[in-house]
Image: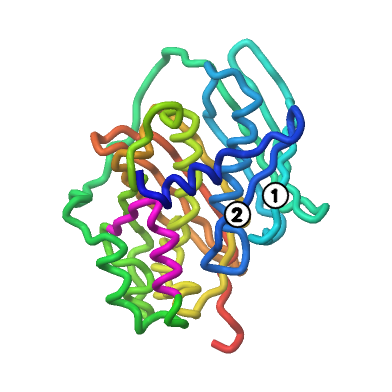
Amino acid sequence: MDATLQYLLDLLDLERIEQDIFRGDSHPSVIPRVFGGQVAAQALVAACRTVPADRLPHSLHSYFLRPGDPGVPIVYTVDRIRDGRSFTTRRVVAVQNGQPIFHLSASFQVHEDGLEHQEPMPEAPDPETLPTAEEMLPRFRDRFVHESVVELLLAARRAVDIRYANDPPYATPGQPRDPRSKVWFRTNGKLAGERDDPMLHICLATYVSDMTLLDSVLLAHGRGGWTVGDVVGASLDHAMWFHRPFRADEWLLYDTESPTSQNGRGLARGRIFTQDGKLAVSVIQEGVVRVPRSL
């Protein structure tokens, strides 16, 4: 297992400080605040720690309330809202310095058989034929606002292998494109032993789901994002539905699109498919997408 993946797994292995209270650290971020996917994944881990193992998350709904400080531990308090025969509901509040920074509600369900259908998986190139972050990012070094951005982005991609099926927004700033993005992703190493837990695979997908979701908003307007310096952005709310079993250490296709943006906000929705075409997860997020006044 790659050392950076081990570090990410350790980051998600929260310290229990009371029955329903947990504490987590943060890793250095490419921006001076806690990465939203990290706090969402840790909050879901906290909720999972209070739920029987036979019940997996089927949905989560969350709000990002304040920027998190990467240098300060985050305390997660879980409220046991309901334990029913089929469904379990948990509410989690993430706190730093006495202030809530994130709020999550998650619902869990025991497995049951039922009606099944799904949308077909869109066409996408074989992930093994696409460039890795190490191969792609240095090509665009001159597009970024600071030389250090490439190294910071590479560090953020070492635990998870992310490969773009089409050019990312920072590759073509100033050129509006179809507001749709596709990336393949998987962890940089296999999960085995006690780490091979279905809940952990779900929490890892939650972590990755916040990485590229707003790309589709940027593409519609020919913006390169914060890396290019033509947009200021942040996640506002984030919702996910987990439909079918999947593994985060096997290739997953993240197909995202943006139906609209307005009033300094952009809406993006995504679908995560397994490599054999099963729709595993649906995602919707609204984020702040502002053009700096100097532009």
Q: Quadrant of residue 247?
A: top left
41 relative to 50, above or below: below
**Rendered residue at 29%/56% (across/down):** 163
179 relative to 227 in the view: left or right: left
**Rendered residue at 45%/27% (across/down):** 194
State the residue position of label 2: 26
Relative depth, front residue between 108 and 19: 19
* Amino acid type indicated by mark 2: Ser
6 relative to 202, above or below: below
6 relative to 144, above or below: above
Residue 198 % position (x, y) = 45, 28
State the residue position of label 1: 74
* Circle 2 SS class: loop
Residue 243 in sight in this render: yes
129 relative to 53 in the view: left or right: left
Residue 102 % position (x, y) = 69, 49
Mark 1 surroundings within 10 Å by alpha-carbon count, few (fewer than 14), some (14 through 19), many (20 or more): many
Q: Is residue 223 magenta?
A: no
Which residues make up the magenta segment? 149-164
* Circle 1 SS class: strand
Residue 148 % position (x, y) = 45, 77
185 relative to 167, above or below: above
278 relative to 13 in the view: left or right: left
Residue 106 % position (x, y) = 62, 33
Between disc 2 and disc 1, whose residue precedes? 2
How far is disc 2 from disc 1 in space, using C-alphas?
A: 8 Å
User: Mark 1 and mark 2 in contact (Cβ < 8 Å)?
Assistant: yes
Give the total number of marks visible in the rendering.
2
* Amino acid type indicated by mark 1: Ile
Mark 2 surroundings within 10 Å by alpha-carbon count, few (fewer than 14), some (14 through 19), many (20 or more): many
Which dot marks residue 276? none
Quadrant placement of the N terminus: top left
